[in-house]
Structure formats: structure tokens, C-alpha cells
Image: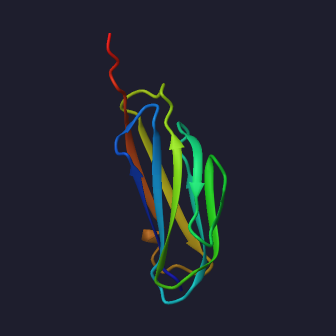
Amino acid sequence: PVDLAVLKTANPQPVAAGADLTYTITVTNLSATATSATMTDPLPPEVTHVSTSPAGGWSCSGTSTVTCTTPALAAMSSAVITIVVHVPETLPAGTVLANTATVSGGLPDPNPDNNSSRNETTVYRFRRPF
């Protein structure tokens, strides 16, 4: 068995309407055995995908759902994937962008509790002068 874990963060927190938001996803192999790994991240429907920067040895595809794979995540190692999205300027203040990334591997995982990570980012708006 192989214990994979995923942690997702967002920056900036909160985010302004009309700005870019960067998700940083860290996939970690907590086991002594290398394994293939797949990270899946369905992006919030309110945002537009700008770019995905995979870790070395990973390949990524998709713009509404980003899927990244590697044939071998080394034992006791981590990989960082960065996804940039654009928050529309028309999005109302107070909108919460909820986003969950999940990871799975090529072998059974004895600890499924750390296979997903959820992030919530609140949108704010700048006040315009009269």
C-alpha cells in the first residue's frame, strides 16, 4: 500500500474581483514505495483557467478540470503543481470560490482521509471613487 496526501492553498486570500488567484497543490508520497499518481482539480465554475505549471516529471491537461499525472512519485517525496485562474471583475463581493483537489495512486491507499484538500477563497471588490 501507498499513502498519498494532497494539500491545496490559494493566494491571495481573499482575492479581488478582476484579479488572478494562484492555487498551489502539493502532492506527497508518505510511503517507502514509489507509485504512479493522479491529481484531479475541478476548478470553480466562476473562474477562468490561465495556466498550469506541473512539477518535474508530471504532465497536466484540462482547463475546467485540471488533471495531472506522473508515472512515478518517489517514496517520501513531494511535488508542487501551480494553477493560476482569473476571477471575473463582475463577480459579486462575498462570493466564495470553493475548490477541492484529490489525489489517487496506482496502489491501494490505507489512509484515504488525506487524499483530498478543500480551499475556500472569498471575493471582494474595490470601491470606486465617485
Residue that lies at the very extreme toward the top in this rendered image:
130
Query: Is 100 in front, or is 13?
Result: 13
Report the side of 106 relative to 86 (left or right).
Answer: right
Residue 54, compared with residue 108, is above or below; it is above
Q: Is residue 74 above or below residue 68?
A: below
How far across and how far down the image is residue 68, in percent? 62, 63
Colour mode?
Answer: rainbow
The quadrant in which residue 56 appears is bottom right
Name the residue at 59% across, 82% down. Answer: 35
Q: Give residue 17's quadrant in the image.
A: top left
Quarter the C terminus occupies: top left
Q: Residue at x 35, y 18 (%)?
A: 128
The image shows a total of numbered marks equal to 0
Q: Position of residue 64 (x, y in %)?
A: 62, 46
Residue 103 located left or right of residue 111:
right
Q: Position of residue 126 (x, y in %)?
A: 35, 26
- Going 54% across and 67% down the picture, which residue do you hit? 103
- 39 above or below 31? above
* x and y, in percent, of residue 106 in the image: 63, 78
Residue at (47, 41) in percent of width and height: 20
**92, above or below 114, in the image:** above
